[in-house]
Amino acid sequence: MLITKDSIYYGYKKAQLSKWPCPNCYSIGLKKLEIRSYENNYSKSKRKTKSKEGVFVGILKCIHEDCSCIISVCGDYRMSQNKNKIVEDFFPLHFNPPIPIFKVAEYEEISFELIEVINMAFRLFWTDLNACSNKIRIVIEQILNDKKIRKTKKLDKPKYGRKTEDISLHKRIILFGEKYPGLDKHLTAIKWIGNEGSHKYEGLDVNDLLDAFAILEDVLESLYGYRSKELNSTIKRINKRKKP
Ligand SMILES: [Zn+2]
């Protein structure tokens, strides 16, 4: 994981804005080209207090010259004064392009659609945790689609004029487990986290989502990573020769 529970916990000081991973080359290190904060009117009306609230906008750039990826960031800003010390907090709500929570593009044979929906989940992670969990649920569906797990089944008798009916996500995950033993448990755990986000108004916190991303990364590594490719060719070779 490029973003961990620890990095989120310490992630709100100005210095941290240069410590997020680059969306293009995944290296850690972004240069702050510009960070501006603006106080809002509500905060100005409470001028007697020594704190300020508002928004911030910024432009970050990857420190590696051969990459030089430019990223915009915006979010909430808070400043408080403790004796003579000024404490500033930055709460990012949006990065564009989205900051990666784990490496995706390095996986071989992963579909464009799957990368797209994972990036959408990375984008929503900062803005709306419940929407992010819904997107992770769509990531599961896309994995099942890519791995050709059936979506529908034939009905013995037509129902409402239909000869087929949809297979539930839960049952599709069971079918997936028959093809990829053990990984169905991973997807089920992610599905529960997704369900929590869909059914509760304030159901999820950052740690729940980082758990889901960590499990998802493990699934992708097993399905598309170099280790799995190497292992699969070994399995094929042994089975073909019927000896090591
Ligand atoms: Zn970069």
Image (cartoon, rainbow, N blue to C red):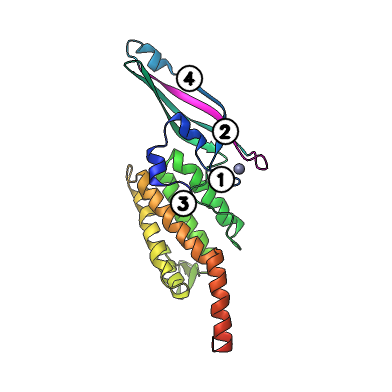
Q: Position of residue 153 (x, y in %)?
A: 48, 72
Q: Are marks 4 and 1 in contact (CB under 8 Å)?
A: no
Residue 62 in the magenta stretch? The answer is yes
Q: Residue at x 48, y 60 (%)?
A: 141
Please name the amino acid that badge 2 sits on: Lys
* Residue that numbered label 2 is attached to: 31
Q: Secondary structure at mark 1?
A: loop
* Residue that numbered label 3 is attached to: 1
Residue 109 in the magenta stretch? The answer is no
Please name the amino acid that badge 4 sits on: Tyr
Mark 1 and ligand 1: say if the CB distance to the nearest ligand atom is below 8 Å.
Answer: yes
* Residue that numbered label 1 is attached to: 27
Q: Which residues are magenta?
A: 51-68
Please name the amino acid that badge 3 sits on: Met
Whole-number angstrom distance, CA of label 3 to CA of label 1: 12 Å
Ligand 1 is found in which quarter of the picture? top right
Whole-number angstrom distance, CA of label 4 to CA of label 3: 33 Å
Q: Position of residue 142 (x, y in %)?
A: 52, 59
* Crowd rating for badge 2 (residues with CA inside 10 Å; few <14, some 14–19, many 20+): some
Location of residue 215 (image quadrant): bottom left
Q: Earlier in the sequence, mark 2 or mark 3?
A: 3
Q: Earlier in the sequence, mark 4 or mark 1?
A: 1
Q: Nearer the viewer, mark 4 or mark 1?
A: 1
